[in-house]
């Protein structure tokens, strides 16, 4: 069959199939009656019957784009967002939440089986989020001189909104064009209100929008952070230069329109030729310039550029899960690899003799040290290191004591092979692997088990409802 695919199917032809699974790269999967597997892109759900156009015939499968849904899956619901399907932020908003959780659990299970070779692994049901909308504590809007036009606008002679100013989200895969957003369902209501006031103020005062290709223009980003603990909003306007009078007027406008909202207002300035919303210099217009958040009984100071989990309530669920798997004893030494601002390290430190956090970003390490002081924690140490050079810290770490437990929370790419090797050389009894990418968890997990560990527990936690992202906790124990 596989050898014949190129003879049986041609690029451009239309096929009909039922979606049976989700797949990588936001695609779905189904089989034709002939048995040929098809990866289909489009906003689909398991159970949809679709008509799709073949765009590539590979030796072992076809790639296609959905043209029409012929029969809708029972998993489907009405998406709650007017720009669903265009924005690209909430790719699963058309799927009911219970079904989303099943898809996510299956995604973790399939990666562990097919990539990791964990044939009989048991993946626990996903720990769901209680709040599935307006849950983000950080949202980053972009400003552009090129507005992404909605399909219905393309043939209009006169547009309702200017085409040369947009404040919203980058259109998927487009670094230049921005889709205008009035209200984002994942952002807090106070963020959406400030978004509207900022747009009004910017247009009223003739702010020039950033043009990424030409590297010109004043207004680049509007970044929010929010503290649930204090109901405080950080508003960070990222611009190409600082205009003190204008920023004062902007701050005054926000404070007068939303007097009830506790706020700190900043202006970050960057001259970099990219669309990353990080300033080279920061001006505090109002308030402290940072917010404080509580996780369990720990307090964290979050500045404009510090890393902090974007779903506060689920971060607590995740960290409690880590604690449960770590099973710490009072005389334990524990290492927290890829520790960011030290949130997990400090969580662990309260329940062991000594905790060490390792992280590459200098400002995160500084934040971690500050957070330890803020919480009166004296048994946590932090080290700035690229974890691929982890072995160079061997003698320094020896003084702290070798770890019985290691927690590792790498970025999407997973652990660097050298970091993984060094971690295994410490031979901890327990490794708690925190992963935002099931495929790389499976790849690294396979290596861990090849060094004499057993995969004991897999617990996914939903940090990002309506997206395909899933965080997973995996507990490996050294076989004795
Ligand atoms: C997924 S975050 C984990 C954050 C933290 N554990 C938390 O829960 O807040 C991954 C972290 O790894 C850090 N990182 C990325 N590459 C690294 C490397 N090569 N060496 C050390 N740290 C790295 C990033 O700066 C980031 O803070």
Image (cartoon, rainbow, N blue to C red):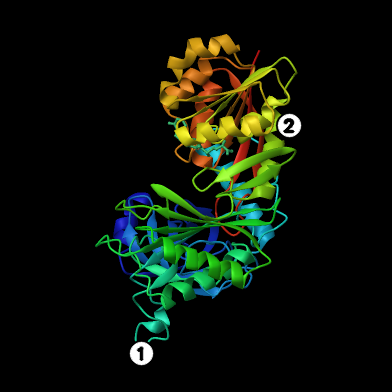
Residue 150 locus on image (x, y percent): 42, 77
Q: Is residue 48 visible?
A: no
Q: Quadrant of residue 255?
A: bottom right
Q: Is residue 219 visible?
A: yes
> Could you tell me how many numbered marks the image carries?
2
Within 10 Å of the Cα at label 1, are there few (<14), some (14-19), or many (20+) other Cα atoms?
A: few
Going by the image, does 444 lie left or right of 455?
Answer: left
Alpha-carbon span between mark 1 and mark 2: 60 Å
In what quadrant of the picture does the C terminus appear?
top right
Q: Which residue is tagged 1?
A: 158
Residue 99 locus on image (x, y percent): 65, 59
Q: Secondary structure at mark 1?
A: loop
Q: Would you say the residues marked 1 and 2 are in contact, meaning their CB atoms lie under 8 Å apart?
A: no
Frontmost residue, 290 versus 151: 290
Q: Nearer the viewer, mark 1 or mark 2?
A: 1
Label 1 CB less than 8 angstroms from ligand 1: no
> Considering only order in the chain, which callout, 2 or 1, is on the residue closer to the N terminus?
1
Label 2 CB less than 8 angstroms from ligand 1: no
Does residue 130 sit above or below 420 in this rendering?
Answer: below
Going by the image, does 210 lie left or right of 303?
Answer: left
Q: Quadrant of residue 335?
A: top right
Residue 324 tag number: 2
Frontmost residue, 99 versus 14: 99
Frontmost residue, 161 versus 60: 161
Determine the residue located farthest toward the left in the rendered image: 214
Q: Secondary structure at mark 2?
A: helix
Q: Quadrant of residue 192?
A: bottom right
Residue at 71 percent across and 31 percent down: it is 323
Does residue 75 sit above or below 23 in this rendering?
Answer: below
Does residue 408 sit above or below 353 in this rendering?
Answer: below
């Amino acid at each position: 069959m596989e050898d014949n695919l190129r003879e049986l199917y041609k690029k451009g032809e239309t096929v009909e199939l039922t979606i049976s699974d989700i797949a990588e790269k936001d695609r779905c999967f189904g089989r034709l009656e002939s048995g040929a597997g098809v990866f289909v892109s489009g906003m689909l759900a398991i159970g949809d019957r679709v008509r799709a156009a073949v765009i590539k015939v590979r030796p072992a499968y076809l790639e296609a784009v959905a043209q029409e849904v012929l029969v809708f899956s029972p998993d489907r619901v009405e998406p709650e967002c007017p720009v669903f399907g265009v924005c690209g932020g909430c790719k699963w908003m058309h799927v009911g939440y219970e079904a989303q959780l099943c898809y996510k659990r299956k995604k973790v299970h399939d990666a562990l089986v097919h990539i990791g070779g964990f044939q009989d692994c048991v993946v626990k049901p996903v720990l769901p989020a209680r709040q599935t909308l307006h849950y983000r504590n950080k949202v980053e809007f972009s400003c552009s001189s090129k507005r992404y036009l909605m399909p219905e606008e393309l043939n209009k002679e006169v547009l309702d909104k200017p085409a040369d100013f947009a404040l919203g989200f980058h259109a998927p895969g487009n670094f230049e064009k921005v889709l205008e957003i009035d209200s984002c369902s994942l952002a807090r209501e106070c963020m959406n209100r400030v978004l509207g006031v900022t747009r009004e103020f910017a247009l009223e005062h003739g702010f020039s929008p950033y043009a990424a290709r030409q590297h010109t223009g004043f207004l680049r980003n509007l970044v929010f952070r929010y503290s649930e603990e204090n109901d405080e909003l950080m508003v960070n306007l990222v611009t190409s230069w600082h205009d003190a009078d204008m920023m004062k007027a902007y701050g005054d406008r926000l404070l007068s329109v939303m007097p009830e909202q506790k706020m700190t207002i900043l202006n970050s300035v960057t001259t970099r030729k990219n669309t990353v919303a990080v300033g080279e210099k920061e001006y505090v217009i109002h308030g402290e310039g940072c917010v404080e958040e509580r996780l369990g009984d720990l307090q964290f100071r979050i500045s404009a550029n510090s890393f902090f989990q974007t779903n506060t309530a689920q971060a607590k669920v995740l960290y409690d899960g880590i604690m449960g798997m770590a099973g710490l004893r009072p005389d334990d030494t524990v290492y927290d690899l890829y520790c960011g601002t030290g949130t997990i390290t400090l969580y662990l430190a309260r329940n062991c003799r000594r905790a060490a956090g390792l992280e590459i970003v200098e400002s995160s390490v500084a934040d971690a040290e500050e957070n330890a002081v803020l919480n009166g924690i004296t048994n946590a140490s932090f080290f700035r290191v690229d974890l691929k050079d982890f072995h160079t810290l061997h003698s320094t770490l020896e003084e702290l004591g070798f770890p019985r437990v290691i927690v590792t929370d790498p970025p999407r790419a997973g652990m660097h092979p050298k970091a993984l090797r060094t971690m295994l050389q410490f031979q901890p009894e327990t490794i708690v692997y925190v992963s935002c990418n099931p495929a790389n968890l499976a790849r690294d997990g396979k290596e861990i088990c090849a060094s004499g560990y057993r995969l004991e527990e897999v617990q996914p936690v939903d940090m990002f409802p309506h997206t395909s992202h899933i965080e997973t906790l995996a507990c490996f124990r050294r076989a004795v």
